[in-house]
Image (tube, grey):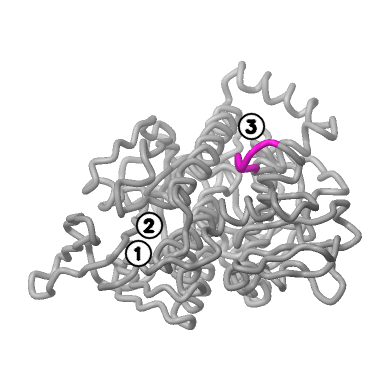
Amino acid sequence: MFDVIVVGGGPTGMMLASELRLQGTGVLVLERDAAPPPYVRSLGLHVRSIEVMDQRGLLERFLEHGGTHPIRGFFAGIDKPAPADLDTAHAYVLGIPQTLTDRLLADHAAEVGAEIRRGRAVTGLEQDDDGVTVHLDDEGEPPLRARFVVGCDGGRSTVRKLLGVGFPGEPSTIDTLLGEMEVTAPPDEITRIMTEVRRTEKRFGLGPSGKPGVYRVVVPAAEVASTPPTLDDVKRQLIAYAGTDFGVHSPRWLSRFGDATRLAERYRVGRVFLAGDAAHVHPPLGGQGLNLGIQDAFNLGWKLAATVNGWAPAGLLDTYESERRPVAADVLTNTRAQMLLTTNEPGARAVRQMLAQLMDFDEVNRFLIEKVTAIGVRYDVGEGHPLLGRRLRDVPLRDARLYELMRTGRGLLLDGTGKLSVDGWADRVGLVAGTGDELDVPAVLSRPDGHVVWVGHDQQTLEDALARWFGSPQARAVV
């Protein structure tokens, strides 16, 4: 009997496995593919995911393998300078290919004790009052048992289909070719032609991959029918849009993606949950997909571990869907809008021109940047102070940075009054004397994922919040 079986070994699954292990939860990751895919669907981490890595002590290893780029307004590819005072200590995009993100998260999950089995495909699920039976495609391998199962197995999720959860939305209507290949054209020629083409075609681009002579190529698929695409397909499309194929050759990998947009009707069926692309798919504009999945895992991990460890208050697991599904719905909305604005229809071009003018207003630009980078997310934890439901940025405290103190995965009370106590919850909540000069509040209680659930100075209302989010002061028996 495992505590949790995670189906899918991509970034969502590995992040979730690490979060579960941080709380001492036994976890098994089952990945269908024997080896990670070679293609690169995502090229970076946005602010909120960078903060997540910092909160868990992982950021330095990501920075070693990626490059930082100052954040800018880029909604629908409209380039605008970012406001000077975004609410983060990490006002940059971390450029890092998904293949490296996958490896770094998988290495970390293994380091903290997650069991990872590759080449294992799930074919069946059966639930009862005590757990979930998981059947595998290898008839010689007996079924597995777990208290909970989480499907992190992508847009074609087997777990979602086995649960019978609807996945309404729109099928793909616009496909794009993507690949890494060598290019013989000189860099200045590539830049000149690409700049000209992108005046009208926003889904076109050639950029260095970080390997000498190798470029990442993006071009509309148009009438290309082959899946996966061929090098000849890429050449043909480059010539159609740019008048040259840039001498592309020796592809490292080729792929295609569409603009399908779907949202799971439910994120939970009994003891089985959905996260990442298993719960939502959308166009890749703004680079939000991988980040959205990592943040799903960050929200679910501590709640699921709290339930396994016996101290979760009633209804805590239900807040995963009530908090994360609206966030995904908002991402679907903004990517639909961005996709529309990249077309060449006269109406779309007119709206794009007007939006570019509106983005010159600081508040409009800020609103869109906070939306795409997820630092504007606010969970509904009740009415009151503006900080409630929002994540805390990293702030300096008396003896440490806030995010350094979050690496234990516990809740945290920042007490500027010197009079408050977390007695009875000290195994789940840390206490820090002082709120820091940047937080103009008496005291703040944050969850393990860094979102604020209480602001005030009164011990009784603090204890009400502690009970709501961290359960009884006496731990319950393990379920």
Label 3, on which residue? Answer: 200
Disc nearest the viewer among 2 and 3? 2
Q: Residue at x 29, y 72 (%)?
A: 2
| Residues rendered magenta in the picture | 378-383
* Disc with the residue nearer the chain's start (2 vs 3): 2
Quarter occupied by residue 9 = bottom left
Q: Residue at x 87, y 63 (%)?
A: 436
User: Does 216 sit left or right of 82 as displayed?
Assistant: left
**CB within 8 Å, label 1 to label 2:** yes
Measure the C-alpha gap from mark 3 to mark 1. 43 Å
Q: Nearer the viewer, residue 344 or 272?
A: 272
Q: Secondary structure at mark 1?
A: strand
Measure the C-alpha gap from mark 1 to mark 2. 7 Å
Q: Residues within 10 Å of mark 2 (few under 14, many from 20)?
A: many
Q: Residues within 10 Å of mark 3 (few under 14, many from 20)?
A: few
**Residue sticking out furthest to the right:** 437
Q: Nearer the viewer, residue 404 or 443?
A: 443
Disc nearest the viewer among 3 and 1? 1
Q: Quadrant of the N terminus?
A: bottom left
Label 2, on which residue? Answer: 152
**Residue sticking out furthest to the left:** 139
